[in-house]
Image (cartoon, coloured by chain):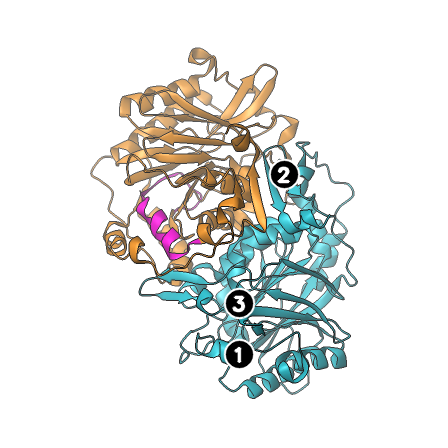
Chain colours: A cyan, B orange
C-alpha cells in the first residue's frame, strides 16, 4: 500500500504543482480493517469549506445574452439537488482472469472492502468478468434481462448492493440479447434493483498500425440509448470506454443534469498514455462536473493489455485521485457543491452562444 | 536561448515520456542569423515519413453506420487539400508595453525574424499592442475598416505580410467600430490583404474570488460570427482566448474543414496553469486537427499577468512545441498529412452517432 501511494504521488506531481488553486489533495492512512487491496484515499473536506463561503450569490458576472438556453435542444436542465452532497466514491481497479467465478467473487470482495472504507458509490472496470478478446466475449456473455442463473455477475451486484446499501456502477460485462452481444454497464441502487443498463454506444474500432488494432464491432453490437440515471448519490451519466472520445455524449449528459459521468474503460498501452487522462479532464472541465473512470488492472500477459490508471476528476478538470496500473481501490471524496462553485467562477452555461450553435439531444427532444 | 530550450525540454518531459507513439520532438540549432528573440525549433520530418507509408488505404476499420453525417448540420465538409502540406509556423510570444509605437515596431521585427527562420505562418498574441486593462483598451483602439493612419497596427501587418509573402494571424487588437469596441483578430494573406477579421465571440467574464475577476464585457462587445479562412497555409479557424473554452466552436470549425485552429490568448496565473494546455490538447484530440496558441510574454508588473506558454498541438493532442513565460518565438513544423493519418487511426468522424446527437452550425446552415 505504501508503494501504491508513493507511485500515486510521483505520478501526480506535474499536475499538483500546476494546480495553484488546488483543493489540496491529501491522503489519509488506511483504516484499521485488514485490506486485500491497496486502498488510496483522498479528500478535500477542509478546503471545500473555505471555498464554499466565498461563492455564488454576490457574483459580479454579467452574463452575455446571446440565447445561451438555445445552445442545447432541449434546453439544459438546471442541476438537480442531489440526495447527498458529499460522499466517498470507490474505483475498483480489478485484476481480471479467465476464471469467471473467481472474477465474480473477487469483485464482490472488492465492493465489500470499498464499503467498509466508507464508499457510497462503487465503480467497477469495463469487462471485469472475462478477458477482453473476441474469443472470450461471447463465451462469457450473460442474459441480463433473464437474470438469476442466466446472469451470475449481475446477480452478485444486486445482492451486494442491497445487502450493503451501496450504489454500484457495475463496470461492464458482455450481455447476450437474442443473437446479439452488447458491452453493457448495469447500475444497481441501494435496494439491489437494476436502475439502468447502458449499452456501449460507440464501439472501439481503431487501427494504429504496429500499435493497436481492434475492431470491437466484429463481436459487439452498439447500444442505441444514452444513459443518465438518478441514484442515491446523484444523477449519473454512463459511458463505456470509447464513448469518452465523443464530447457530444458528455455534453448531452451535462444538459440532462448529470453531476457525475462514470466511464468504465480499458484504454490500452498506446491510447492510454496518450489520451486517457486528457479525455477525462476535458470532459470534466468543459462540462463542469465530476468524471470517474475505472479500468481493469494491467495484465502484461493478456492479449489486450489495459492501461489502468483509474481516476477521479473534479469539475475544474483537476485530477483528485488516481493510481498506477496495479490492482487497487481508489477511494476519494466527491463534493457536488464544487460543481455550483465552478459554474459561478466560470459561468460557461450562461455564456454559450445559442445564436451560433446548438447541440441537439435527439432522444431527449423526442421524449419531451 | 540555451536557457529557453532547456526549460522547454524540462517542462515537456512529462508528456514526452507518455507519448510512446511520438513523432519524436527534436530541436534544431538556431540559424546563423543574429537573433533578438529566443527561437525554439521543433520538427518531425523523419518520423512523419515513416508514418505516412503505413497509412490510409488498407484500414480494416468497419465504420458503424449510425448516420454519422447527421452528427453535424450542415454535414461536415471533407478536409480540403491545403496549398502546402508541410510548413513552419511561428508563435511570437511578445512582451507588451504601454508604448504602442514600440509594440508595433517590436512585432514587426519579430515577424521579420520568424520569416528569416523559415516561418510561412506567423501568429501574434491576444492584445499585443497595448496593456490588457479596462482603462487601456478603448484608448488604444483602432478603426480597422478605415485602415491607414486609423489603424497603424494592421497597416504594419499588411505591409510586412505583403513584403515578406507570409500569412499572419495578427493576434488581436482592440477595434473601434462606431461606438463599440471589439477584441479583433486580423488575418493577412501573402498579398498583404486582410483576408478575415474575427471578433472574439465569447467574452472573458469570470470570477474566481481572490484569484482572478475580470469582466471583459464592461468594455468589449461580442463578435457575431465564427471565422474560418482559407489561406496559403491551409484552412484556419480563429478563436480568441476565452473562445477556446467552448468546444462547440472548435467542433464547428472542424466541420467546416479547418486544418488548424489558432487561438491568440492571454490566460492568467490562475486559469493558465489549470486549463491552458488542457483546453488546447482537448480541442486538438477531439477534432483531430492542429491547434496553435499565442500568448503575450509575462509581465509580473502588469495589472493583468499573462501565463505565456504559447503552444502548438498536433492532431493526436500531442504538444509539439511550447515555451515558458518569457518572450520567445516558438517555431515548429506543421504536417497536415498527420490529420488524415490520425483520422484513419481513430475514425471518429465515421463513428459519430448522428442518430443520437447533432451539432447545428446556425450560420453555416443559413448560408447553405
Chain letter of disc 3 in the image? A
State which chain disc 2 sits on: A
Q: In this view of the protein, which residue sits in the foreground, B69 or B29?
A: B69
Badges 3 and 2, same chain = yes
**Residue B167 vs residue A311: left or right?**
left
The mark lying in front, picked from 2 and 1, is 2
- Circle count: 3
Vertical position of residue A306 compared to residue B321: above or below:
below
Mark 3, Cα crowd under 10 Å, few <14 / some 14-19 / many 20+, is: many
Q: Which mark lies nearer to you, 1 or 3?
A: 3
Is residue A280 left or right of A217 when viewed as pictured?
right
The earlier-in-sequence mark between 2 and 1 is 1
Disc 1 is placed on an element classified as: loop
Categorize mark 2 by other alpha carbons within 10 Å: few (<14), some (14-19), many (20+): many
Q: Residue A265, labelled with which disc?
A: 3
Circle on res. A327? 1
Looking at this view, is B7 or B138 the one in front?
B138
Residue occupied by mark 2:
A352
Q: How far separated are the C-alphas under marks 2 and 1?
A: 41 Å
Residue beneath the point at 65% across and 85% down: A149
Rounded to the nearest angstrom, the CA distance separating label 3 from label 2 is 30 Å
- Residue at image position (37%, 66%) is A212
| Stretch of the chain drawn in magenta | B322-347
Q: Is residue B332 magenta?
A: yes
Amino acid at each position: 500500500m505504501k508503494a501504491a501511494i508513493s507511485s500515486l504521488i510521483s505520478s501526480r506531481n506535474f499536475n499538483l504543482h500546476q494546480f495553484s488553486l488546488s483543493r489540496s489533495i491529501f491522503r489519509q492512512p488506511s483504516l484499521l480493517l485488514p485490506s486485500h487491496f491497496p486502498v488510496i484515499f483522498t479528500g478535500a473536506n477542509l478546503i471545500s469549506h473555505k471555498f464554499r463561503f466565498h461563492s455564488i450569490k454576490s457574483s459580479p458576472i454579467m452574463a452575455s445574452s446571446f440565447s445561451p438556453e438555445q445552445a442545447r435542444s432541449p434546453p439544459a436542465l438546471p442541476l438537480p439537488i442531489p440526495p447527498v452532497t458529499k460522499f466517498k466514491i470507490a474505483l475498483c481497479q480489478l485484476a481480471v482472469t479467465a476464471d469467471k467465478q473467481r472474477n465474480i467473487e473477487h469483485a464482490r470482495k472488492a465492493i465489500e472492502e470499498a464499503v467498509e472504507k466508507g464508499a457510497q458509490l462503487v465503480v467497477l472496470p469495463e469487462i471485469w468478468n472475462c478477458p477482453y478478446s473476441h474469443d472470450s466475449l461471447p463465451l462469457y456473455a450473460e442474459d441480463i434481462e433473464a437474470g438469476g442463473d442466466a446472469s451470475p455477475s449481475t446477480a452478485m451486484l444486486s445482492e451486494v448492493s442491497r445487502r450493503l446499501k451501496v450504489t454500484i456502477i457495475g463496470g461492464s460485462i458482455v450481455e447476450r440479447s437474442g443473437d446479439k452481444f452488447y458491452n453493457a454497464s448495469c447500475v444497481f441502487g441501494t435496494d439491489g434493483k437494476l436502475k439502468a443498463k447502458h449499452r456501449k454506444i460507440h464501439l472501439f474500432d481503431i487501427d494504429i498500425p504496429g500499435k493497436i488494432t481492434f475492431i470491437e464491432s466484429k463481436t459487439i453490437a452498439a447500444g442505441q440509448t444514452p444513459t443518465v440515471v438518478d441514484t442515491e448519490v446523484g444523477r449519473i451519466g454512463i459511458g463505456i470506454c470509447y464513448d469518452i472520445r465523443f464530447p457530444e455524449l458528455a455534453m448531452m449528459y451535462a444538459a440532462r443534469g448529470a453531476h457525475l459521468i462514470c466511464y468504465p474503460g480499458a484504454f490500452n498501452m498506446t491510447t492510454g498514455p496518450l489520451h486517457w487522462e486528457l479525455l477525462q479532464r476535458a470532459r470534466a472541465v468543459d462540462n463542469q462536473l465530476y468524471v470517474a473512470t475505472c479500468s481493469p488492472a494491467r495484465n502484461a500477459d493478456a492479449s489486450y493489455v489495459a492501461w489502468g490508471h483509474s481516476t477521479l476528476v473534479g469539475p475544474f478538470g483537476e485530477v483528485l485521485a488516481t493510481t498506477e496500473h496495479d490492482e487497487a481501490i481508489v477511494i476519494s471524496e466527491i463534493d457536488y457543491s464544487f460543481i455550483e462553485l465552478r459554474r459561478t467562477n466560470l459561468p460557461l452555461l450562461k455564456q454559450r452562444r445559442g445564436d451560433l450553435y446548438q447541440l441537439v439531444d435527439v432522444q431527449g427532444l423526442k421524449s419531451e
